[in-house]
Amino acid sequence: MQVLIRANYDEMSKEAAGYVSSEMRKKVKFVLGLATGSTPLGLYKELIRMHKEEGLDFSNVTTFNLDEYYGLSPTHEQSYSYFMWENLFKHVNIKKENVHIPDGLAKDVDKFCEEYEHMIEEAGGIDLQVLGIGSDGHIAFNEPISSLGSRTRLKTLTEETIKDNARFFKDESEVPRYAITMGVGTVFEARKTVLLASGAKKAEVVAKAIEGSVTASITASALQLHRDTIVVLDEEAAGKLKRKEYYKYVDKMVKEFNK
Ligand code: GLP
C-alpha cells in the first residue's frame, strides 16, 4: 500500500486523476471501476478536463460502478446512475454500452448480481477500481461485518450511512434502505485500487482502515491485503495517521528513485 498525502482536496483530486489517466493510457481496452459520493467529484472533473484539453480517450474504456441504491430508477436524481452520467459520462466519449451500473430496479436481485459479476469477468476483470470510504469504514456499500470474501449482492444500509447520505435527499426518510453493491471480494479482484478520502471527518476511519487491524468491521481495511493499492488523502483526512511523516518520506523517496 502506498499512501500519498496532498495539501488539499484539489491536489488530492489531481494526483488521483494523474494516476487514473496514466493507467488508462497504458492499455488499449481498459476496464475502470468507478465510485460515487462527493469525494471523487474532483477526480471526475479533472478527467473531463483531460478529455477536453489533452485528448484523454474513453472510447475503449468499459466501466463498472461499485453500487446503486435499491429501489431508485436510473433517472432518479439521487441514483448513482444519474450521478455518473451528470458528473462524468455525458462529458466524455464513452460508449453507452460500455457503461455498467447495478440496476436499482432489478426484480430478481440474486440473478442480477450474478450477471453483474459475470459481466465483469467477461470484460476481463477490473484494471483499476476507484474507491471512497464511508464514515463507518465501508467501501462501496460493504457495511460493517460484510464478509471480506463477499460478492455483488443486496445490502442493508447502516443508520450511519443513511444519516450521512441524507444530505443528498430532501428528507432522511427518502434515503433507500438497501443497495446493490459489489462485494469486498469483487473489489479485491481489481488489479489496482485507488482509495480517496478528504476532510477531517474521515481522519479517524482512514487511520483505522490503513493502520488498524484487518477486520470485517471496517471493510476498507481489507485493502491492506491487496497487492496494488494507492491511498490518496488530503492533509485533513491524513490527520490521524501515526506514520504520516513516514508515508510522506516514502512518497519523496519513490519519486527520487524513479527520476
Ligand atoms: C457512499 C458510497 C461509497 C462512498 C461513500 C462516501 O456510501 N456507496 O462508495 O465511498 O458514500 O461518500 P463521500 O465521498 O460523499 O464521503
Image (cartoon, rainbow, N blue to C red):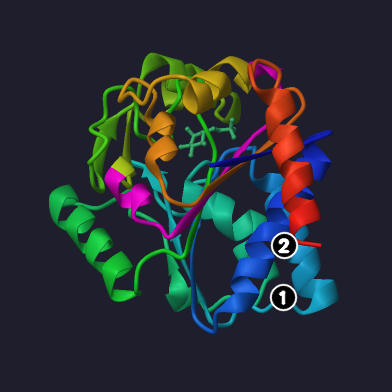
Q: Which residue is mark 1?
A: 56
Read off the magenta span: 185-201
Measured along the vertical axis of the image, is residue 171 above or below residue 104?
above
Q: Secondary structure at mark 1?
A: loop
- Toward the viewer: 66 or 72? 66
Residue count near mark 2 (Cα–Cα under 10 Å), binned few <14, some 14–19, many ≥20: many
Q: Is residue 143 left or right of residue 82?
A: left
Confirm whether the magenta stretch covers residue 194. Answer: yes
Residue type, mark 2 in image:
Leu
Residue type, mark 1 in image:
Leu
For the point 24% across and 53% down, the residue is 106
For the point 74% across and 22% down, the residue is 236
Q: Which residue is mark 2?
A: 47
**Residue 259 screen position, x and y as percent:** 81, 62
**Residue 14 screen position, x and y as percent:** 78, 51
Q: Confirm or deny contact between disc 2 and disc 1 (CB under 8 A).
A: yes
**Residue 27 screen position, x and y as percent:** 55, 79
**Residue 165 screen position, x and y as percent:** 52, 26
